Image (cartoon, rainbow, N blue to C red):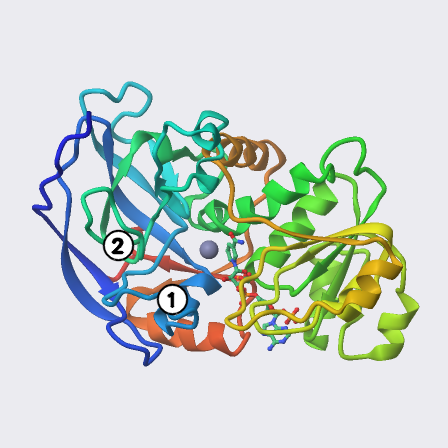
Amino acid sequence: MEVTPNHTQTVSGWAATDESGKVAPFIFKRRENGVDDVTIKVEYCGMCHTDLHFVNNDWGITMYPVVPGHEITGVVTKVGTNVSTFKAGDRVGVGCISGSCLDCEHCARSEENYCDKVTLTYNGVFWDGSVTYGGYSGMFVANKRFLVRIPDSLPLDAAAPLLCAGITVYSPMKQHGMLDQRGAGRRLGVVGLGGLGHVAVKFGKAFGLRVTVISTSPAKEREARENLMADDFVLSTDQKQMQAMARSLDYVIDTVSASHSLGPILELLKVNGKLVLVAAPDKPVELPSFPLIFGKRTVSGSMTGGMKETQEMMDLCGEHGITCDIELVFTDRINDALARLARNDVRYRFVLDIGGSNARL
Ligand code: NAP
Ligand code: ZN
């Protein structure tokens, strides 16, 4: 039986209160640490483009004040009496989801992300009706089921974006067979080289895929090839380059945060190729039927990942030494970082230093 939470703990964070695109310091309450809960001192929090969509109310569903942040890493400070798997001092993380019914077929398969009653880590509705607040804050109370252990080999700052960007691309890559024998040597296209995209490139290379980056930013070509080890780079605004790649890819992951057409991207797929849309632009993407039917191609979607899969991804990253390319941001520069994220000026993820060793607040 769930215990009624008392929202008594005072926490400092940063919230957007309107559609101005900015956050400001914000004091709020979190629940007491319940029997199944773990309290975390937040050290780092990645800045996902979803944070920007919510801050700006791009999707028309923001419940202000919104405290963004769902790429949270930190250290356990307290555990409830039913918690035996975590203890004070453990290095842990919380991603996009922090609650679900734990009872339905999806929860039974650890696909908590597809539970009808899933609670988002922020701008979600907790079971007592309160609105959830995310990781742009000093402390977080998480149910043990929604906590991820961070391997000792991974730094807490560069691992933080794995909790959303990482699992969001890992889950469909695994589901579509890109990460097993079926995938080796096959060709993956990654559209949009941002937070999600750069991790998709890293996973692709780690699992033996040939990876093509499809980007609007010529300036990213060199680093995509040299730092991320991408095999090919195609400028999506150059029709000749796009035509030269027609029918060459087995899979595409689309991470473009702005409205766009899937038509030119579908043309890059072989017959029977698969496009996974993980991006969530504010306006519907255009889906012309010709490139779809002429190539018997498939378009599907995917939202973050389940908890078992998230831990599996994190452990694999620990084994393979996969981390994100980040730029650390002090908390007095959050709004600059949000503005730069809005104009596609980030390589490849901003991570807020909230309580890390160099934190300023
Ligand atoms: P990001 O770091 O801002 O990267 C998005 C990339 O899209 C940019 O790097 C850019 O790549 C491309 N892009 C941006 N504006 C563009 C424009 N006007 N036209 C064409 N390309 C443009 O964002 P992110 O954090 O990776 O998130 C990407 C999207 O996924 C967002 O919509 C986010 O809400 C969504 N998301 C979904 C899930 C899920 O569970 N499905 C989880 C997390 C995020 P180039 O410079 O290479 O063109
Ligand atoms: Zn995210």
Examine the image and state in which quarter residue 63 appears: bottom left
Q: Is residue 48 visible?
A: yes
The vertical placement of 72 against 227, above or below, is: above
Q: CA distance from mark 2 to mark 1?
A: 12 Å
Residue 133's disc number: 2
Instruction: List the single residue furthest toward the right.
Output: 244
SS category of the residue bearing label 2? loop
Residue 352 — which label?
Answer: none
In the rendered structure, the answer to whether residue 238 lies left or right of residue 310 reads right
Residue at point 46%, 41% (across, down) = 113
Q: Work out whether residue 207 or residue 99 is closer to the camera in this orientation and state it.
A: 99
Q: Residue at x 84, y 78 (%)?
A: 239
Within the image, what quadrant is residue 174 found in? top right
Q: Horizontal and vertical percent for residue 310? A: 50, 36
Q: Secondary structure at mark 1?
A: helix
Query: Is 337 on the left or on the right of 199, as rendered?
Result: left
Query: Measured from the top left, where is residue 58 in percent x and y?
Result: 43, 72
Q: Amino acid at mark 1?
A: Phe
Q: Position of residue 10 (x, y in %)?
A: 10, 51
With 347 as the anchor, is 180 left or right in this view? right
Task: Name the residue tied to disc 1.
Answer: 54
Quarter of the view holding residue 186: top right
Q: Which amino acid does the dot numbered 2 rest on?
A: Tyr
